Image (tube, rainbow, N blue to C red):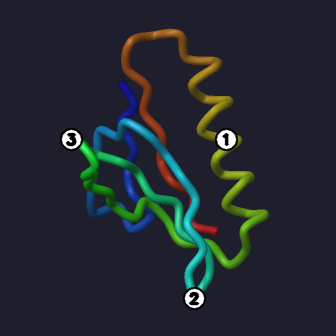
Amino acid sequence: MLWIITQDKNNLLNVKEVRIRKTANGTNIEGIVSRSFLVFWDRVLGKYDSNERALEVIKEIYEKLEKDKSITTTFTMPKN
C-alpha cells in the first residue's frame, strides 16, 4: 500500500499506480486512486517543469518502495 502526500500538502492519497502525463504547462505526476472496468480515477500528485524531473521523482518513489519492505509505504511529493 502506497500513501502519498501531494505536492501542495493538501491531500494524503492511497494510490494504486503512479504515472507521468505531459501537459501544456509542464509535466504532472498522477496517482491512480481507484479503477473499475475501463474507468479509472486519478489525482495530480505533483507538477514539474520537465519530464526529466518527473522521471527523477518516479525513481525516488521506486527507491523508497524498494527500501521500505513493510506493507505500507509513505512518500511526500517534492516541491520541484
- CA separation in Å, label 3 and label 2: 29 Å
- CA separation in Å, label 3 and label 1: 28 Å
* 3 or 1: tag closer to the N-terminus: 3
Residue 56 image point, x, y percent: 74, 52
The quadrant in which the C terminus is found is bottom right
Q: Which residue is mark 1?
A: 60
- CA separation in Å, label 1 and label 2: 23 Å
Q: Residues within 10 Å of mark 3 (few under 14, many from 20)?
A: few
| Label 2 secondary element | loop
Residue sticking out furthest to the right:
52
* 3 or 2: tag closer to the N-terminus: 2
Considering only vertical position in the picture, is 51 above or below 66? below
Considering only vertical position in the picture, is 35 above or below 67? below
Residue 30 image point, x, y percent: 45, 58
Q: Which residue is mark 2?
A: 25
- Looking at the image, residue 39 sits to the left or right of residue 80; the answer is left
Residue 75 image point, x, y percent: 48, 40
Say whether marks 3 and 2 touch (CB < 8 Å): no
Residue sticking out furthest to the front:
38
Residue at x 60%, y 29% (from the top left corner): 64
Q: Residues within 10 Å of mark 1 (few under 14, many from 20)?
A: some
Say whether marks 1 and 2 touch (CB < 8 Å): no
| Label 3 secondary element | strand
Numbered tag placed on residue 36 in the rendering: 3
Q: Nearer the viewer, residue 2 or 30?
A: 30
The residue type indicated by label 2 comes to Asn
Which of the two discs, 1 and 2, sits closer to the camera? 2
- Looking at the image, residue 11 sits to the left or right of residue 72; the answer is left
Which of the two discs, 3 and 1, sits closer to the camera? 3
Q: Total label count?
A: 3
